[in-house]
Amino acid sequence: PPPPPPPVATGIEVCTAEDGTVVDPQRPAPAPQINGWVRCVDSGNGALMRERQAQAGRWMGGVRTYHANGRLFEDYTLNAQGQRQGAWRSFGPEGYRLQELRYANGQLVEQGLRWHPGTEQLAQAQFLDGRQRPIASAEFTPDGRLTALRCGPQPLLGPAFDDTRACGFAGDTPARGAEVLLHDADGAVVGRSAHLRGQRVLHEELAPGRRVLSRETIVGNRRSLWVWRNDGTLETESTWDRRLTGEEQQVRERSFAPGNWLQRDRRFVQGLLAVDETFWPNTRIRERTEWSAVRHESGDPALRAHTIWQFHDNGRMAFEGNFAVLPLTNERPRPTTGPVGLHRWWDANGQPRLEREFNAMGEVLRERALGPGGAAPAGPPPSAAPTSPQRP
C-alpha cells in the first residue's frame, strides 16, 4: 500500500548537521564531510519536519519524518545505495500505529503485521519472499503468548518479534537450540519447539500436564518423529534422511501395539519401501515382504516384484511365494502384480501342506495338497496366504 501523505509545511525546510553545517535538502547527496544526523525544521514555525543520517557523502542510516504537531510520522532506514532497507513504520498524528512494512534493497517485501481486533497486541508477524511464499512467521494469543513459530534462514521478523533469539541466531544459543513454548487460544501450553540458526531441531506436541504426544527432532540430515498414544505408550517411530539426494526420503517406520511390542517394521531405500515386516505379540516375526528396487514405468511403487514369507507364532514357516508385474491382456488392460512361480504352505509343525505353481501370466499351472510325509491330506488344504500383491 502507498504511504500516507507527508505533513504539510508552513515554511521553507531548513536543514543542519550535528556540527551546525547548513545542508541543502534538495541535493541528492550530502557533502562528503557531513556525518551523523541532519535535522530539518520548518522555517515558519520551527517545528521538526525530518531527520536523516549521512555517512561519507551519502544518505545512509535512519530516516524520521514528523507530523506538524511534532509526533513521529515515518521511521525507516536507507542502505548504502540510498534504498529503503528493513522496517518502514508510519504513525498517525496522535501516535497510533498506521502501517508497518518491510523493504529489501528498495523493494517492498510482503512482511505483514496483523493485530488482534481492537487491541495493540500483535496477532501475527509474517515474512514472504519475492514469490509471496512465507519463509518466517510468528503468531500470538490476545495476551501475547506465542502460538506458532516458523523461522527463516536469518532473522526476518524484528522488531515485531525477536526471532534472533527465538530462532537460535543469538551467539549464546545452546547446542540443543533455543526453546520456545507454544500455546492454544486459552493460553495453555500445547507445544515446545527449539531452533538453531533458523532450523527447527525439536518440536513436541504436548497434552495437558505437558505430557509429550509427539516429538520431532532433526540432527544433521536426519529427521525423526515419535508419536505416543493418550495412555503414554509409543505408537509410531519414523525417520527420514536427505543425505543422498538432498531431498528428504523416508528411511524407516516402526509401529507398536498398545501392549508396547513391535507390530510392524518398514524400511525404505531411496524413498521406496524395501522390507516390510509384521510381528506376533510374542515378538516373533509374522510376515516379511521384500520389494525389488526396479521401478515400473508407470511410477506406481506397488507395481514392483516382491517376495512374501509368512510364519506361525512358533517361528515356523507358514508360506513362501513370489509376485511380479503381470503382462497386459484383454481381460487385464492395466498393469497389476500377481503370483508367479511356486507358492508353498506349511502347517505349524513345519509339515508341507500345499504347493501351487503359477506361470508368468499369474495363472495356476498345478496345485498339490500334501499331508504328513508328503501324502494327500485327509482334510481340506490350509487357508491360503495372499495370492494378490501387498501394497507398500
Image (spheres, rainbow, N blue to C red):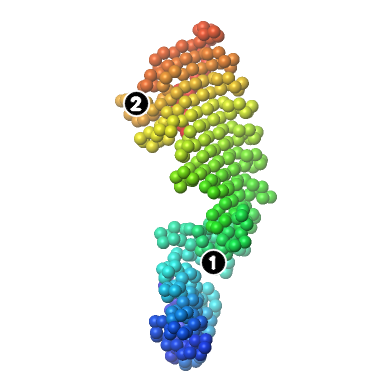
Residue 298 visible in the shown view: yes
The local secondary structure at tag 2 comes to loop
Q: Which residue is mark 2?
A: 327
**Residue for point 39% across, 21% down:** 362
Q: Is residue 282 above or below residue 132?
A: above
Q: Residue at image x 47%, y 92%?
A: 43
Q: Farthest residue in the bottom direction?
A: 44
Q: Quadrant of residue 305?
A: top left
> Circle 1: is it few (<14), some (14-19), or many (20+) Cα within 10 Å?
few
Percent x, y of residue 217: 58, 48
For this orientation, the residue located farthest to the right is 209
Q: Is residue 135 left or right of residue 234?
A: left
* Residue 47 visible (yes or no): no
Residue furthest to the left in view is 330
Residue 370 vs 15, above or below: the answer is: above
* Residue drawn at (44%, 65%) of the image: 109
Task: Locate residue 228 relative to residue 128 in the image: left or right.
Answer: right
At label 2, which amino acid type do we have?
Answer: Pro
**Distance from the alpha carbon under mark 1 to that under mark 2:** 62 Å
> Which residue is at 64% across, 35% downward?
260
Q: Secondary structure at mark 1?
A: loop
Residue 353, percent from left and from top? 52, 13
Q: Position of residue 50 (x, y in %)?
A: 48, 83
What is the quadrant of the N terminus in the image?
bottom left
Circle 1 residue: 158
Q: In this orientation, which residue lies closer to the viewer: 122 or 156?
A: 156
Q: Amino acid at mark 1?
A: Gly
Return the x and y of residue 101 as percentages of the image width and height: 47, 69
Mark earlier in primary sequence (1, 2): 1
79 lies above or below 204: below
